[in-house]
Image: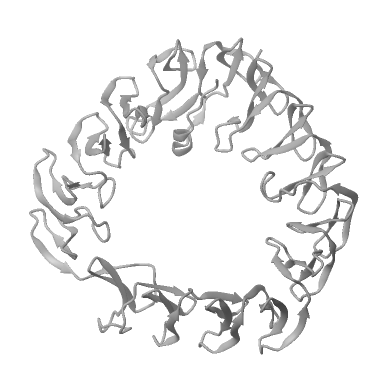
Amino acid sequence: MFHFLFFFQLFFGLNNSQGLIPYNKNGQWGFCDASKKVIISPQYEEVELFIIDSNLVTKKPVMFANVKYKGKWGLIDAQNNWLIPAKYTTPMQWDREHGRFYIQEMNYETGKGSFMMLNQEGKELLKLNDLVNWRGFDKNGIAYVAVNEKVGFINRDGKILIPFQYDMWSPVTEYCYSEGLFGIGKNGKFGFVNDKNQVVIPFIYEHNPMGMGCFENGKATVIKNGQRVVIDKKGQILRKLPFIEENNIMIEGYTLKMEVINNQGWYTLIDNKTKKLAIAEKFHNISLEGNQLVVYKNDKYGLINSKTFQYTYPLTLTEKPVLISKGNVNYWQITINGLSGLIDMDGKAVVPMEYQALYIRTLENGQLIVNKKNNFLLINLQNNILKKLDYKEIRENYFSNPITFSVTNAQGLQGVINAKGEEIIPCQYKRVSNFHQIYFGLQENKKQVLFDSLGKRIQKEEFDDYEYVGFGTLGENFVKVSLNNKIGVLDKKGRITVPCQYDNINMNFYTEIFIVQEKGLFGLRNPEKLLVSPKYTEIITDDGGRYPIKIDGKPYYLVKKGTQTGFVGLDGTEYFE
C-alpha cells in the first residue's frame, strides 16, 4: 500500500524534491524521474513523497522521504542513504518551525500510545509513553502537553519543564506561558507556577476563559468570585474590572461592554465622553446590522436605532429580525407566530405580518411574491394584489440568474416562473430540475428535455430520466446526464462536454479531472479529450489531498491493474511494472 502523511505537508508548505515519482516493481517501491529512469531501485514496502525544506531554527536544509523497510519506518535522502534508520512503527512528521521530527501513536481502545521527538540528525530528544495529546510548540518552543489527560509543559529540546499533573486544558489558551510563569489548572481552579513547578500564584481563580489572559508587563487578568481583576506576579489585586470589553460593534464614540453577573454576561453600550449608559437596559446580546442594533434578552429580540438609541421595534419578537437589502433600500423582515412582513428602517410597516412566506429574492421594482394561507400572490409594497399565482407549491431555484422559481400546479405538473410570476417554462412536466442556468424537464415519456434560463429549448437530444445529481458528484460546473443508458457531462450552459458513452463518470475535485468507467475499467479525461483510456481496475482518489499526488505541479494517479499497483500521469505514462 502507498502511504502518505500530508498533514504537515499541507500546514508547513513542504515541496517535492527533484521531481521523484514513487515507482513500483513487483510490489516493491522505489523512485524514478518523469522519464521513468529509476533513481532509487524498488526495495521498500511503502514510501512517502520526497520532501525538501528548510529547518527554520538551524537554517539548515532538510531533504528526506519516509520509507518502510522490513516492517519499520525510517528516512532516506535522494541518494538512498539512511538519514534515520528504519526502526519506527509509523512515519515521521516534520516540523520546519522548530526543526523536529515527531512520531506519535495513539490507540484509544487499548489506552496505550507513545510520542517521540527527534532532531534533524535523528537524535531522540524525548520519549513519552501512554496517550499523548498536544497541539505543537508555540513561538517560544514550548508546548502544552497532556499525558493520560494530565497536562504539563515541554520544550523543543525535549526537556519536561512542568510535570504532567495538572488539569486539561488551560482555560485561557493552550499555551499559557509568559514572563517565566505557566498559567495552568488544578482541581477546577486556575493559578500560576514557575519553571521549577513551584506555585507562585495559588489555584484560586475561576476556570472561565472569558476575559482572562497570561502575564504581560507584569500583569495578568483573572476572574475571582465572578469579578474580573488585574493581578501582579505576587497575586496582589491591582484593580477591578467590572466590565469586559467586546469588539464586535463599532459605533463611533461608544464602546460595547459586558458585565458578568452571576456568571452570565450582560451587554450594554457606554458613551465614551460621559462614561454613562447610552441605553438604559442591559441585554444578553447586541449586534449591529445596517443602522440598527439587534438586541436580545429573555428569549426576545428587538431593534434599536444606532443613532437615537430608541426602539425601532419593541423587544417582543421570538424570531430574530432579518435585514433585507435591495439596492439602496433596506427593510427588516419581521416574523410573529409564524407570519412574516416587512418594516422600513424607521419601524413603519411596509408589508403587514400576515404571510406564511415572503419570497424575498422576488423583491424587485416594488413587487413581491408571497404566500397567504397557501395562496400565492404577487403584491406591491402597498400590499395590493397584482396577480394571483395558481400553484400549490413554489420552490426557489438557487444559483439561478435571472432569479427563477420552480412551481407545481394542482395537477402535480411542474414548470418555472420568473420574479414577476410569469411562466417561462409551462407547467407540463413531471419534474423540473435546475442546474445553474439550465433546466431539465421530465416528460411523460420519461425523457428529459433541456431549457435555458429564458425557457428556450436547447440541445436536440432527449436525455434519460437519470437520477439528477445537481451540484454534488461533479462539482459546481458540471452535471451528469444519461442518453440511452450511457453517461455524459453537461456544463453550466447546457453544452455537452463529455459525450454520453460511459457507464459512469465521477470527478476528482483535487485536479478537476473526470474519472470515467467503461466495462468495469477506469480511465481519465478532461472536458476536451480522453487522457488515459479505461484500463485500470481501480483509480484511488482522496479529495482530502492525499491522492492523486502532485509532483512539479503535475498530478499522478494511484491505480491498480490486476495485481499491480502504481502511478499513472495524465499523459498515460505508467510508473509501475
* Residue 420 visible in the shown view: yes
Q: Residue 418's spot in the image, x, y percent? A: 77, 71
In the image shown, does 225 or 230 lie closer to the viewer? 225
Residue shown at the point (63%, 75%) measured from the top left? 357
Residue shown at the point (29%, 72%) measured from the top left? 266
Q: Quadrant of the N terminus?
A: top right
Q: Residue 166's spot in the image, x, y percent? A: 19, 41
Residue shown at the point (82%, 48%) measured from the top left? 465
Above/below status of 564 relative to 298: above
Q: Quadrant of residue 574?
A: top right
Q: Residue 218's spot in the image, x, y percent? A: 14, 55
In the image shown, does 272 or 338 lie closer to the viewer? 338
Q: Quadrant of residue 91?
A: top left
* Residue 303 visible in the shown view: no
Above/below status of 447 relative to 426: above
Relative to 43, 440 lies left or right = right
Q: Quadrant of the C terminus?
A: top right
Q: Residue 119's spot in the image, x, y percent? A: 32, 24
